[in-house]
Amino acid sequence: MSVAFRRESDEEHKEPKFEIPLPVGPNLVTERGLAHLHEKAAELEARVSAAPDEAAAEAARRELRYWRTRIATAQLMPPPDGEEVAFGSRVRFRLNGAERTIDIVGDDEADPAQHRIAFSAPIARAIMGAEPGDFADFGGKADAIEILAVSPIP
């Protein structure tokens, strides 16, 4: 039989599954963020055990590897002093005339809808080290952000 008509296994034609990419830089976490990592790992361990088929189990194991790596590399940061913007700070600021409040947290804890911004986000990087009354450049504009208040995340 000609090689052209021979059916190879379906596995040879599937797209490869790569590991979930890790965020660049250190894995800084708050206490809440570290608890979140452990919760996700526990949830995925249960999902692996209860998986209805091998494909679902493998998908859950892939995600579990990501969260276990994040736990292994987590660097628990001490609470900030609240005098200047730092990792773990709640910051009230004015940008384009509107007041906003954000919490600066780790990559895996970030949730912009809940006003939790990763320390690696551009706005967080722009205001790091600033104190109340300071101005920071942002978006190509000088003094675009005015820091109004800084405190540790409760």
Image (cartoon, rainbow, N blue to C red):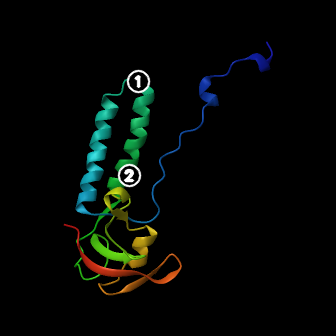
Observer-nearest residue: 31 or 16?
31
Residue corresponding to mark 1? 53
Q: Find residue 14 and name its label.
A: none
Instruction: Classify the position of the C terminus by image quarter.
Output: bottom left
Residue 32 visible in the shown view: yes
The residue shown at (45%, 59%) is: 23
Instruction: Classify the position of the N terminus by image quarter.
Output: top right
Query: Toward which corner of the image does residue 62 lie, by quadrant?
Result: top left
Observer-nearest residue: 44 or 119?
119
Callout 2–callout 1 Cβ contact below 8 Å: no
First in sequence: mark 2 vs mark 1: 1
The residue shown at (60%, 36%) is: 15
Residue that sits furthest to the right in the current view? 2
> What amino acid is labelled 2 in the image?
Thr
Mark 2 residue crowding within 10 angstroms, few (<14) / some (14–19) / many (20+): few
Mark 1 residue crowding within 10 angstroms, few (<14) / some (14–19) / many (20+): few
Query: Toward which corner of the image does residue 148 lie, by quadrant?
Result: bottom left
Q: Find residue 69 and name its label.
A: 2
> What amino acid is labelled 1 in the image?
Asp
Badge 1 marks a residue whose secondary structure is loop
The residues tagged by marks 2 and 1 sit, at their Cα atoms, a distance apart of 25 Å
Left or right placement of residue 89 versus residue 135 in this view: left
Location of residue 26 in the rendering, given as x and y in whole percent from the top left corner = 40, 65
Badge 2 marks a residue whose secondary structure is helix
In the rendered image, the vertical position of residue 72 relative to residue 138, given as above or below: above
User: Which mark lies nearer to you, 2 or 1?
Assistant: 1
Observer-nearest residue: 8 or 50?
50
Residue that sits furthest to the bottom in the current view? 133
The residue shown at (28%, 58%) is: 33
In the rendered image, the vertical position of residue 73 relative to residue 140, given as above or below: above
Residue that sits furthest to the top in the current view? 1
Location of residue 137 in the rendering, given as x and y in whole percent from the top left corner = 46, 82
